[in-house]
Amino acid sequence: MSKALKLGVAGLGTVGIDALKLIALHGERFASRTGCAVEIGGVSARNRRKNREIDISPYEWFDDPVALAESQDIDVFVELIGGEDGVAKASVEAALKAGKHVVTANKALLAHHGIELARLADAKGVALSFEAAVAGGIPAIKTIRESLLANNITRVYGILNGTCNYILTQMQKEGRAFDEVLQEAQDAGYAEADPTFDIGGYDTAHKLAILTTLAFGVETSIDTVYVEGIESISLADIEAADDLGYRIKLLGVALLTESGIEQRVHPTMVPKNTAIAEVDGVTNCVAFDGNFVGDILLIGPGAGGGPTASAVISDVLDIAKGRISPPFAWRTEDLKPYERARMRSHEGGYYIRLKVFDRTGAFAAIAGRMAEHGISLESIVQRRPAAALPGLDARGDDGAPLPVVMITHETTEAAIRAALKAIEDEGNVQERPRMIRIEKL
Amino acid sequence: MSKALKLGVAGLGTVGIDALKLIALHGERFASRTGCAVEIGGVSARNRRKNREIDISPYEWFDDPVALAESQDIDVFVELIGGEDGVAKASVEAALKAGKHVVTANKALLAHHGIELARLADAKGVALSFEAAVAGGIPAIKTIRESLLANNITRVYGILNGTCNYILTQMQKEGRAFDEVLQEAQDAGYAEADPTFDIGGYDTAHKLAILTTLAFGVETSIDTVYVEGIESISLADIEAADDLGYRIKLLGVALLTESGIEQRVHPTMVPKNTAIAEVDGVTNCVAFDGNFVGDILLIGPGAGGGPTASAVISDVLDIAKGRISPPFAWRTEDLKPYERARMRSHEGGYYIRLKVFDRTGAFAAIAGRMAEHGISLESIVQRRPAAALPGLDARGDDGAPLPVVMITHETTEAAIRAALKAIEDEGNVQERPRMIRIEKL
């Protein structure tokens, strides 16, 4: 109780301000609950004079976050600046080199430089904590690092980007097109003016790479993740999925296979009537399969000031209690090299959507290409017009190509790609076949 | 790495055996991950010679778990005997008094004697850990104790009993009656020969009392929980709920209100299309509302050898890392007295099912009683026969009383009870009105 842990908070956006509010509101109690008071030793941000929700004048101001990171007056550097390089990286490095603990919400920094920073933290015996960097308020990192420590993790996956999930949810619930919902999300502040980082799947890939290292104890980085975004998901896909008993979610999945670890981010079909299918809007989730514990699913707010500040302060309070864990759950010298399982060897079921020209033999040819690649079909649905399959005994009412949707039994990515290429080359389809992977839950 | 933490494992049922298997399989790795090896210092069970899945002869045997608890050869006493009193309590007390850490999965012991045992643990500076006692493999305890430590918790609730959830799920999915599904659950080993402890809601109440103390820092116990079981849930309720957009789950709910803390276990209507509504079969879940983090929901296996052993060993590994927390997240001297909010002041919506005699003015009288108690109705459904309301303009095809289901707007438990009593007394209904509370998610 005699000691106080002093924080230097760099970055005073929503999260930084909510962290200061949280400490102002509950700080007194922390001392009795951790044996160590938590105080603010200094703050830093781009603009000192910006109009903020709270008065920051009581806190010592630093123009330069690196100077704050190195200040004698702080024990923990709380990095809420963001960005994979630049001042965020420089100040975190400075803090670690000065023997300060670091708490950060910066997924980009961690996904690109996490292991190198963890080495620095290990060498200095300080914490590098980042509960807030993956899935906001959800205690995903602590769950892997501590609660599931007894297990071999075989898969970790989740809905890790609120923007994508909001867009997919709105498309499904309101029957509206991607562009329209994206525009609305931008207007509402759920999506950036340049939405590529989110909707392209890159944000999810950053978080997945962090989870992969934690779950499997391997040295990985963002570059090793296979990434597909949600830009090409159409309302027709959403509706066909619904008919077939699925929802479409952008998942990040890291899976232990015999040929290494698959890391993939892509739109994914998940069965309706599962909890993950009901994770809607900006909510996130993270799931773990462990060899003893079985399947665990954590759901909660993936972003926002309050949830992220809650996660940041949970890291701070662990440090206040003297609980320093290896940043990535394994000592950095024990991390193994990452063995990448190629996407071509991915195994699973697939959803395929084709626009088939209405001519005799067209569907027979398509079915033939699938069979040649050893792919068997679980179901075939033709949605509009309400007739049978093209080229067999049906005829679209305006002669237009007919949409056909198929669900395959388990096969390989290589087989699907080859079959779809053959189908496209053969010319019975109007456009490139669409394919969405199905995840077994 | 030099030191080893020695466990005394008392109780060699499914969980005890899986804990031994887990250590045999992964124990070597624990040393490098925690800095401290984990070994077995002795085991105890009722029957030494019972045929078990693994050979226990390498472990030192103790006939008396109390002797094991006090053995010089152990650092941590792992109590997997069960039961609120008797040898479980005696051996846990003996271990704590001897300055040994205790890890237990025994919810009954904790719900009845937890605070008294926590005092003993606090006095000796040892751990009393029980991640496995609530919701099996789900890291509910660590999430409250550590991840949400920065928050004021305003509500904690969950599906905490797999037997009840299995029965309700089967009734809903297969349209079968309670008795039939219960019998099946007993045959499959999901329900005890005497199922009262589970289906009466008492098992849930035990776990809820533990969560209440952790979440709100109050001294509570099983006796302070309002309990209703699932025995009276009929297929008619399940089907009416489905029509109205709800699922019925047995929830334990602890809620901070202006007049104290509500603790209640009862069948509850939760909206379909929510993750909790999709928590099916023997799966459990625990949800927290925090003032900064918002709503967090954890889903996973609530029982079984593997998940429970995973939770037990996570507690052991925290002890191996030297991380000793106050058992109930607050130091026992900081626990506040429990202020009980009476059920009569509970506020919420209600589902009501009546069998109304088909006579003129019957429904008008019922509606009048509701209005007199200030209760307004959100919806009214008459399911069979497909006609309108009794006594207004409808007639059952065999003259039998007509089932009527109503959903109320928010009101109080006192108002509902008074209105239903008046309705029953007035004689327009054939049987006592059924009432199920609706939980806002």
Image: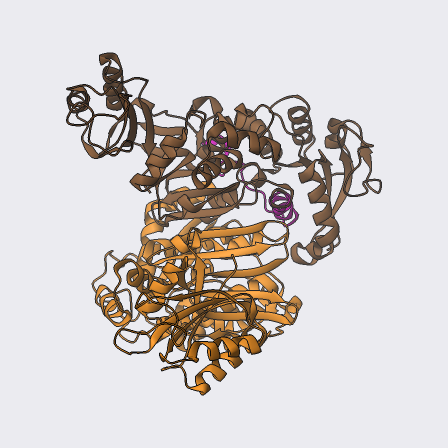
Chain colours: A brown, B orange
Range shown magenta: A309-334
Who is closer to the viewer here, A436 or B59?
A: A436
- The part of the image, by quadrant, that contains residue A51 is top right
User: Which quadrant of the rendered structure holds the C terminus of chain A?
Assistant: top left
Q: Which residue is pictured at 24% across the width and 68% down the height?
A: B186
Say whether residue A310 is magenta.
yes
Foreground residue, B2 or A282? A282
Membership of B157 in magenta stretch: no
Rendering quarter of residue B45: bottom left
Position of residue B237 relative to residue B39, above or below, is below
Asked if residue A248 can be seen in this view, the reply is yes
Give the residue at the far right of this rendering: A57
Quarter occupied by residue A69: top right
Q: Position of residue A44 (x, y in %)?
A: 76, 32
Instruction: Give how far across and how far down residue A383 sits, in percent.
Output: 28, 33
Q: Position of residue A145 (x, y in %)?
A: 49, 43
Give the percent coordinates (x, y) of residue A117.
58, 28
| B282 in relation to A307, above or below | below
Q: Quadrant of the N terminus of chain A?
A: bottom right
Nearer to the camera, A33 or B318: A33
Q: Is residue B36 visible?
A: no
Q: Residue furthest front?
A: B393
